[in-house]
Image (spheres, rainbow, N blue to C red):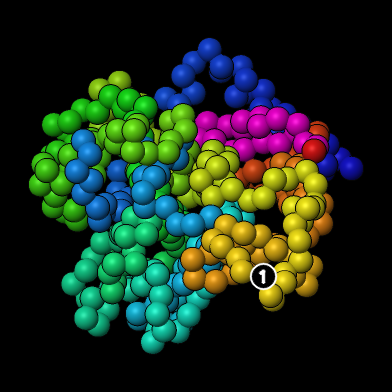
Amino acid sequence: MKTNNFARLALAALVSFSLSNCDKDTEDVFETDQIDYAKSAHVCIAKWDSPYGAKATSVKDKQWETGQTIRVKFLNGSSFVQSKVRQYAVQWEDHANLKFEWVSSNSSANIKIAFREGEYANEAGSWSYLGTDSNDFAHSMHFGWFNNNTTDAEFRRTTIHEFGHALGLIHEHQNPVAGINWDKETVYAYYAGPPNNWSRAQVDNNLFRRYEASITNYSTYDPLSIMHYPIPAEHTLDGVGVGSNNNLSATDKSFIGTIYPFPATGGDPCDGVAPYNGSTSYSTGDQVTYNGDLYQRTSTGWSNLGACGAVSTDPCDGVAPYNGSTSYSTGDQVTYNGDLYQRTASGWSNLGPCGG
């Protein structure tokens, strides 16, 4: 009991610290190890060049069909690195009405992944084509720095980030409403050196360009987004940096759910949906029930949208209580005294009460 009380006091102190600093711009303050990491972090290369001059942001015409099963295959790589990519990529499935089907290397697929070896040994960066553009390339996603010694944090950060692109999300710092106060000459000089060796035009495309609101879905700007580059404070004129985001943020989770929504929650998603009938002709978007599951017709077949039955609307479902002996990272969530909290770079943020 004493240990539990101590843990509660520790969390309360952290929350109190965050609240007592509300009069400051809390985004100005970041943990030292995050900022140090931001100065040397690998960054993703944008493999698209929109002719249009996006809190999470997506390009509308690159999105998959809601409920679609996306086929994914590996072109090479050890069983270990492949397993790590699968482990973290599927986190998107918890929040988006999409499924990944992992198929063999000789099967047809929508997303085709390679690692830096064999015929791709000279491909050092990590990148993904945007959304449905993946269909058009024999090699559509690449992990240029993964190997058997890569840390779990790096596997998680880069895999979730690249699969975000594959679902149609662009970089968060290019959100139409981001408004980052860049020190452009410092950024040009930084990225001109190794390991990036980028031209000014490449820096413009990967960092400074913001997408037009008319062609994107976007939320309020989210510095905690998994789709955000880490930004050292010295790369901005106002000294506001962004640490390395290794997890889906609360807005990442809610936003992707608006792009690929699940059936309405709060009741049984199968209510009012007729059972499958083999003599009926169905069109894309039609829904049926079959063997206790809800299915939706797509252009290529049937997509399983999940089991019938009441759906919980409690945001705390599946979230573990705060544990004082656990080390938490930015983006991690816990429950405490009936509320949901998320770890930020400067403390704990209260996301609201648990309950339906």
Q: Specify the farthest residue to the right.
A: 1
Q: Residue at position x 34%, y 67% from top?
A: 135
Q: Which residue is mark 1?
A: 280
Q: For residue 9, what is the image quadrant?
A: top right
Residue 348: percent from the left, percent from the top? 62, 32
Q: Quadrant of the N terminus?
A: top right
Instruction: Out of 298 and 342, give the one closest to the viewer.
Output: 298
Judge left or right: residue 279 versus residue 119: right
Quick check: 135 above or below 242? below
Q: Residue at position x 33%, y 73% from top?
A: 114
- Element carrying mark 1: loop
**Can residue 246 be seen at all in this image of the molecule?**
yes
Instruction: Out of 150 and 106, give the one closest to the viewer.
Output: 106
Crowd band around label 1 with a 10 angstrom C-alpha radius: few (<14), some (14–19), many (20+): few
Residue 271: percent from the left, percent from the top? 79, 53
Look at the magenta stretch and give its main secondary structure. strand
Q: Is residue 18 magenta?
A: no
Q: Specify the farthest residue to the bottom.
A: 106
Residue 281: percent from the left, percent from the top? 61, 69
Residue 243: percent from the left, percent from the top? 41, 39
**Identity of the amino acid at label 1?**
Thr
**Can residue 148 be seen at all in this image of the molecule?**
no
Per the rendered image, the range of residues in magenta is: 339-355
Label count reads 1
Quick check: 97 above or below 147? above
Instruction: Out of 100 and 174, give the one closest to the viewer.
Output: 100
Q: Residue at position x 48%, y 80% from top?
A: 103
